[in-house]
Amino acid sequence: MRSFEYWLAPSRSDWITNDNLGHGPAASCRSSPNERDVMSVDDLQDPARSEGKSRKAAFAAFSGAFIEWYDFYLYGIASALVFPQLFFADADASVSLMASFGAFAAGFIARPIGALLFGHFGDRHGRKTMLIITVLIMGVCTLLMGLVPTYESIGWWAPAALITLRIVQGLGIGGEFGGGALVALENAPSRKRGLMGSFHQLGTPMGLLVSTGVFSLVQLLPESSFLAWGWRIPFLLSGVFLVFALFLRSSLPETEVFRKRKTQEPARHIPLMSLLREQPGYLLLGLGARMADAVTFNVINVFGIAYATSTLGLSQQMMLTGFVMSAAVQVFLTPLIGMFSDRVGRRPVYMAGIVVCAIGGLAYFPLLSTGEAWVVWPTIIVVQAVGTGLMFTIQGTFFAEMFSTRVRYTSLGMIYQGSALLGGAPTPLIAAALASAFAGSYWGPALYLFAMTLVSLACVIAITETYRSEL
């Protein structure tokens, strides 16, 4: 029976570069034989040291991802249930909701800018410092959102302050995904990248679980107390999580892969230009591949909660409980999905998630319209925990393996935040507009979701398998 150390230590059969896999766009990103030899010897000589470093990096990556997604889900829920009344109350209900979703989308505009900014310095100077800065920006902005006075107190200064904080927060979030994913992956043994990368992605269901759970608890307050001060409690809790994340990340060393690459060749002056010159095809394919995940989540969660409560007549508590249950299931599934992708490859796992979202997206609102909890909750779990989970769990790993070290931070940030801007930010608005155009029917948003899954499926089919490639 093979020992645990065997699975931690990368095998010689795994030293396959992107070029050997037939990745045309990666032709100029060949790793040198010396680099591969040094990495394999280090891991084989001291597997316990490698394991400890990998675990520490995985927890540090998780901490930032947790804050990112706690903030994201919290703002999304508040955009549907609180902000229309408290910050955009100078209009009728439908216009207030559209204005609130518009503010939700504003944060996405800054994300690609943050991805470029932090990706540039992360690829040139290292991952660690960028990770500390991004988590500070995210946590402080969410904390301040919980202190902003409402429209009733200061008029239009209230939504202006909210939107400003949302945009600044978007800068930090834009740089978080690439750095967080890489600190886990670049410290991971080659045969365990899917598993170790999943710990970074574990921040997603944990962020959803905690944010939705906390929001559900404060909703138990009398409505007057909830609207007066109760909704602020989940935002203020971000300060506690920020201290925890800073403690973990401040003691983290620079990633081994980056340090070795830096000693072998100078950093690119402008990593983005190198990326566009050397691997533009994979950048576009990565953007397209992530559209299914970005669109599905925002249709079923951000738009879906508002539509289910206002049009289908479901209670807010039923919807929030469903997403809490789904997040709990996804916490369990995430490391299993990562391990499975280490065995069978990234593409089969990712395509399975697309198929689940395509079918589940068409059935989602018809099943929700039954109004029965025993139907609604499993529907949310299948589409969110299983469908998007199969994709999101391995995104950082899958996309990182497509690019070279010198542009990897920039690449991940551009793919993730670019797709968030194109597929995430406008989706609640598009879904609301389509529902209105279809006379209040859910088929418009459902068909839009289905079309985006087809785009992603075509892109993943065009990407060569990466799970045996060497970072």
Image (tube, grey):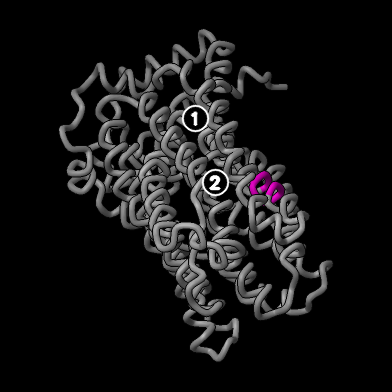
Dot 1, how many residues are within 10 Å of its Cα: few (below 14), some (14-19), or many (20+)? many
Residue that appears at 68% across and 73% down: 309
Tell whether 364 sits left or right of 297: right
Res 104 visible? yes
Q: Residue pushed farthest left?
A: 269
Residue in front for this viewpoint, 331 or 336: 331
Residue that appears at 64% across and 44% down: 233
The disc placed on residue 389 is none
Res 447 visible? no
- Alpha-carbon distance for marks 2 and 1? 31 Å
Q: Secondary structure at mark 1?
A: helix
Residue in front for this viewpoint, 75 or 452: 75
Residue receiving disc 1: 184
Residue receiving disc 2: 146
Residue 380 lies in the magenta-colored region? no
Residue that appears at 82% across and 68% down: 373
Q: Residue pushed farthest top?
A: 45
Residue type beneath disc 1: Ala
Rendered image quadrant of residue 371? bottom right
x and y percent of residue 314 in the render?
74, 73
Residue that appears at 39% across and 41% down: 172
Q: Quadrant of the C terminus?
A: top left
Q: Secondary structure at mark 2?
A: loop
| Most frequent secondary structure within the magenta stretch | helix
Report the magenta residues as a range. 209-214
Front position among marks 2 and 1: 2
Dot 2, how many residues are within 10 Å of its Cα: few (below 14), some (14-19), or many (20+)? some
Residue in front for this viewpoint, 165 or 290: 165
Q: Is residue 227 above or below residue 48?
A: below
x and y percent of residue 45 in the render?
51, 8
Q: Mark 2 or mark 1: name the one nearer the start of the chain.
A: 2
